[in-house]
Amino acid sequence: IMADSGWDADDNPIFRRGRRMAIISACWKVISTLTFSNGVMLLYLNALGLDGPTVLYLLSLQNVVSAVGLVPCAYVCDCWSRRRLALIGIVMVAVGFVFFPLGGFFPKGSMLYMLLIVGSLLVGMGQAAQVSGWFAALAPIVPAATRGRFFGTMRVLFQLTSVFMALLV
């Protein structure tokens, strides 16, 4: 389809901007992924005084919600809009992360648990929404000839951002 339109995906500034934004969004996603996987959230939840099973439940809840929500989000993505759903997912992750520091202002009790559970649910659904249309959104802007180089660059930058964020923590 792109060959018939006369647009060359390598030279088109709109496609180059789209590829650049995809790499930047992948690097931003590292922050939410690392927070739950490298021990930052574990330390924070322990500092709040939560017991071990509750901490494990809260740490795994985000992954379970993301796995369960991926297929429905992919269906919505096909019916609605890939970019719009990805942006909603990014906002949901950001709003979900706001609930975690808010929990620090409440004593250990039902309000604290509610804030942490809602935050985990929002982060999980946000990540599912962001990831669900990822490859479908990239297909029109990444030509087949440069797809390997693009995903290689994205993976290297993803890993460098991971290392940098881990060093900050």
Image (cartoon, helix red, strand yellow):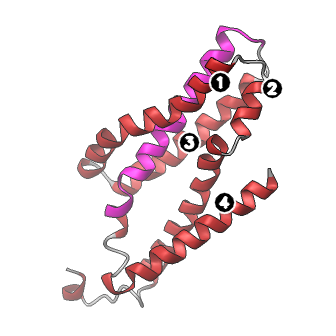
For label 4, count other residues whose C-alpha is less than 10 Å away and answer few (under 14), some (14-19) or many (20+): many
Which amino acid does the dot numbered 1 rest on?
Val
Q: Earlier in the sequence, mark 3 or mark 1?
A: 1
Mark 1 highlights which residue? 55
For label 3, count other residues whose C-alpha is less than 10 Å away and answer few (under 14), some (14-19) or many (20+): many
Which amino acid does the dot numbered 4 rest on?
Ser
Q: Which mark is residue 93?
A: 3
Q: Which mark is residue 47?
A: 2
Q: Which mark is residue 21?
A: none
The CA distance from mark 3 to mark 1 is 19 Å
Q: Earlier in the sequence, mark 2 or mark 4?
A: 2
The CA distance from mark 2 to mark 3 is 22 Å
Quarter where residue 75 is shown: top left
Q: Secondary structure at mark 2?
A: helix
Q: Earlier in the sequence, mark 4 or mark 1?
A: 1
Q: Is residue 109 magenta?
A: yes
Q: Secondary structure at mark 3?
A: helix
Q: Is residue 101 left or right of residue 83?
A: right
- Front: mark 3 or 4: 4
Which amino acid does the dot numbered 3 rest on?
Val
Percent coordinates x, y for residue 154 in the rendering:
53, 71
Q: Residue at x 32, y 53 (%)?
A: 81
Q: Earlier in the sequence, mark 3 or mark 4?
A: 3
Quarter where residue 1 is shown: bottom left
The CA distance from mark 3 to mark 4 is 17 Å
